[in-house]
């Protein structure tokens, strides 16, 4: 029997033989740009990286590649480069085939994109080792900056540990776009003249620079969400970049990309949105879209968790809130919330009956058993959130209006998105320290973006700040009834209660209840607690929700809970989110 070590050696040898012809034919593809000064024309001596392993440009020689120093890119791009929504004025040139924007990177084995906190452009992220010397004809890494262009060259570089038996020759070119008009847009070129190795031995490669974890090529926003990687990245097929192109009619070894509006044009759109993971149930079926290669895929964000009373299928078995041990003594889990157990002798609201589980239910539904994902209303089974409209900052879950961020705990610097109009409402997203705020908003110390007009405003309970004014969270358009049956909106939340009878004009009989004006008034009044219809001056609401005066200046205003909030906060059902958006838009037009 062949010993495992010898077997690996044999396999490596076979792999080397198999790709020899490929490597030979891949060499000497498109020529690299030069004429930039220095011994080889790729850059002056003070713009070259000292021979090293896993280091970065550290200034003019003599240096050893440590510590990394930023390279000012404004001589080429005076307004900086907009890369995935952040404008950068400098970059770091790293030995291992990439440039980064938040600091030097010594990682030699390419991790699969997306990578957290390290935005990068990588023409060949692999274990480059230039410590064997041979400059300037081999192991030379230099850069050149001129107006509207930056050229970075890895000229005939070897791999770890200081091997020069195979060499790679490639280049990164950043230039002002000839078609873009927005400030910060730019073009990217990857040029490959020689492709002979894929992997250093510390990344599992063999003695001829093959196998293991091969190089990765592409772009990463550093936000764990947006990236574009060539499909052959981290496979032996990455050698094909010397023999192929993404430019129609282009020479082999030429790859071009446009960075427009911060993203890779024609690369990937639609990242960061909720999606359903195929084959998964409950919380495990909740995912977020990621840019993968040139397309979008759905990545699972939750693993099974202990059961809890929150309207979620936490343990991913297809049944939410199952079990009688989810709440405290004399309490019962009712539609995602622990409530006091009812007593038959004490009764429930009018039209409700105390069930054997200890919950108040519609009398017409007392003997109706609905399947998972449905609830009983007026004696029939309907969709779990069918007909339920929630107040601002809440969504329908398990048939009840809840704040999707309440009780949610996010990891690290992530925060729970508390903006109802956002497609990620109720999800854990990167705090604003790690992502830019929208125009007209500023980053606050707690990681949330605050509308500039609302910064410093603290709104009373049950209100939220919009364009510098505190708005009632219980306001609703005409014909809209907030909260599920048996509940009314009070202080921005749905609480048990009986909706007030609609106010009709004197002399109008019940038979005239279908009159348009009466119906509209009934819809508005029924959607709110009676106390909410009083304006700031004590007068009755004449048809529009009151604007409440801002309170004393204090911390930034938000209606959502500020307590730590789950690494899976995807409680916002799409239906509730859409309704929230619709309410917000209608309110804006009013």
Image (cartoon, grey):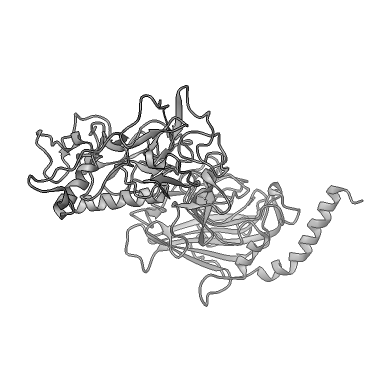
Is residue 558 shown above or below 35?
Answer: above
**Residue 159 x %, y %:** 67, 53
Q: Nearer the viewer, residue 494 or 104?
A: 494
**Residue 540 x %, y %:** 11, 38
Residue sitting farthest toward the top: 329
Q: Nearer the viewer, residue 231 or 533?
A: 533
Is residue 171 shown above or below 464?
Answer: below
**Residue 443 x %, y %:** 33, 40
**Residue 152 x %, y %:** 51, 58
The residue shown at (42%, 62%) is 175
Q: Is residue 46 visible from the viewing direction of this image?
A: no
Residue sitting farthest toward the left: 507
Residue sitting farthest toward the right: 1
Q: Nearer the viewer, residue 202 or 506?
A: 506
Report the number of numbered marks: 0
| 470 left or right of 194 in image | left
Is residue 391 shown above or below 27?
Answer: above
Image-quadrant location for residue 342: top left
Residue sitting farthest toward the bottom: 249
Q: Is residue 196 visible from the viewing direction of this image?
A: yes
| 408 left or right of 230 in image | left
């Amino acid at each position: 029997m062949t010993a495992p070590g010898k077997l690996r050696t044999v396999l490596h040898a076979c792999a080397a033989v198999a790709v020899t012809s490929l490597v030979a034919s891949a060499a000497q593809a498109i020529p690299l740009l030069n004429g930039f000064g220095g011994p080889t024309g790729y850059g002056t001596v003070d713009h070259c990286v000292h021979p090293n392993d896993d280091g970065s440009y550290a200034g003019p020689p003599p240096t050893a590649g440590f510590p990394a120093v930023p390279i000012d890119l404004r001589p080429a791009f005076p307004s900086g480069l907009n890369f995935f929504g952040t404008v950068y004025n400098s970059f770091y040139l790293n030995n291992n085939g990439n440039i980064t924007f938040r600091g030097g990177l010594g990682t030699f084995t390419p991790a699969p994109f997306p990578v957290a906190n390290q935005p990068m452009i990588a023409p060949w992220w692999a274990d480059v080792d230039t410590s064997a010397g041979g400059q300037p004809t081999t192991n030379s890494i230099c850069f050149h900056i001129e107006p509207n262009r930056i050229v970075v060259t890895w000229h005939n570089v070897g791999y770890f540990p200081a091997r020069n038996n195979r060499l790679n020759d490639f280049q990164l070119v950043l230039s002002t776009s000839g078609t873009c008009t927005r400030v910060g847009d730019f073009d990217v070129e990857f040029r490959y003249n020689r492709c002979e190795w894929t992997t250093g031995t510390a990344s599992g490669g063999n003695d001829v620079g093959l196998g293991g974890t091969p190089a990765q090529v592409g772009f990463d926003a550093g936000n764990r969400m947006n990236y574009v990687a060539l499909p052959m990245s981290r496979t032996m097929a990455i050698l094909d970049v010397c023999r192929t192109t993404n430019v129609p009619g282009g020479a082999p070894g030429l790859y071009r990309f446009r960075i427009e509006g911060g993203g890779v044009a024609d690369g990937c759109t639609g990242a960061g949105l909720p999606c359903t993971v195929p084959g998964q149930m409950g919380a495990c079926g909740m995912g977020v879209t990621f840019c993968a290669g040139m397309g979008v895929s759905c990545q699972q964000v939750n693993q099974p968790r202990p059961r809890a009373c929150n309207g979620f299928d936490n343990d991913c078995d297809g049944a939410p809130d199952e079990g009688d041990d989810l709440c405290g003594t004399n309490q019962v889990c009712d539609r995602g919330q622990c409530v006091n157990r009812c007593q038959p002798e004490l009764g429930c609201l009018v039209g409700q009956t105390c069930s054997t589980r200890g919950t108040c239910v519609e009398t017409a539904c007392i003997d109706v058993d609905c399947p998972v994902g449905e609830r009983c209303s007026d004696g029939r089974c309907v969709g779990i959130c069918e007909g339920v409209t929630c107040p601002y900052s809440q969504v329908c879950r398990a048939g009840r209006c809840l704040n999707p961020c309440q009780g949610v705990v996010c990891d690290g610097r992530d925060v729970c998105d508390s903006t109802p109009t956002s497609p990620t409402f109720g999800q854990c997203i990167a705090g604003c320290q790690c992502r830019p705020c929208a125009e007209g908003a500023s980053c606050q110390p707690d990681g949330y973006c605050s509308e500039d007009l609302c910064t410093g405003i603290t709104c009373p309970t049950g209100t939220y700040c919009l364009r510098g004014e505190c708005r009632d969270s219980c306001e609703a358009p005409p014909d809209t009834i907030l909260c599920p049956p048996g509940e009314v909106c009070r202080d921005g939340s749905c609480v048990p209660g009986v909706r007030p009878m609609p106010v009709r004009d004197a002399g109008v009989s019940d038979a005239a209840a279908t009159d348009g004006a009466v119906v509209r008034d009934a819809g508005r009044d029924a959607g709110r607690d009676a106390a909410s219809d009083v304006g700031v001056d004590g007068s009755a609401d004449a048809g529009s929700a009151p604007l409440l005066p801002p309170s004393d200046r204090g911390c930034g205003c938000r209606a959502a809970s500020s307590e730590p909030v789950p690494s899976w906060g995807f409680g916002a059902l799409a239906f509730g989110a859409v309704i929230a958006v619709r309410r917000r838009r209608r309110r804006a037009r009013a």
